[in-house]
Amino acid sequence: YTDSETIFLPNVIAEMETAEDNFRLAKALVAMLWAQTRYGSFRIDISQAMATYAEPKHALRVFSALETLRLEAIIARELPGLHRDMQRLKTQLKQDTLSDTWHAHAEALARPDATVEDSLRLLAAAIEDSAPPAFCFQGELRPDAVAQCMHSRIEHEKMLLRVKLAQLAEEHTHQEQEATS
């Protein structure tokens, strides 16, 4: 998972038969977690959005699957070599087929202008569909970890802003004193 600042990986990735494929899986997992931050998965308050559903944990799993489909489409456009590796991993683990409904969701989220809001809009329909797909490189969404990290980052940036403003005020005062001398 990622908290939007740090990527957390398992100590060992041994899902595949060969070390080379396990390395590909680790690389795909890192790319997907990076993409969550880079392409806006955390631009919404995920916890708040999931709280509107009767089963927030299930809603989060479905939302995570939708976001994975959206981000996978972006990776296909931006990093085609990595995307080929991801497809190969899915095929090896027999995760390469989607139900008709999930295929339709994947097509909708493959549009170049698709955003996290599109995943959120599709969630209402997808939550009623068959079980969401889970892919080997999907990772977890941990909205509480993201919220805590963002809160800490905002507090840190506020403190830095206060320090910088104090320095500017001191410089301004010093310049005014020099001008009047």
Image (tube, rainbow, N blue to C red):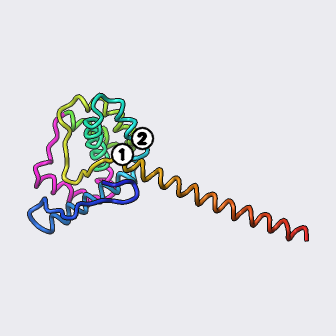
Quadrant for the N terminus, please: bottom left
Residue at point 32%, 33% (across, down): 122
Q: Residue furthest left?
A: 17
Judged from the image, the secondary structure of the residue bearing numbered disc 1 is helix
CB under 8 Å between discs 2 and 1: yes
Q: Identify the magenta region.
A: 74-100
- Residue 15, image x and y in percent? 13, 59
Quadrant for the C terminus, please: bottom right
Residue at point 77%, 64% (across, down): 172
- Residue 105, image x and y in percent? 26, 37
- Residue 115, image x and y in percent? 39, 42
| Residue 95 lies in the magenta-colored region | yes
Tell me the residue that label 1 is attached to: 143
Circle 2: residue type: Asp
Is 21 on the left-hand or right-hand side of 59? left
Tell me the residue that label 2 is attached to: 45
Circle 1: residue type: Pro
Does 56 sit above or below residue 36? above
| Residue 49 lies in the magenta-colored region | no
Judged from the image, the secondary structure of the residue bearing numbered disc 2 is loop
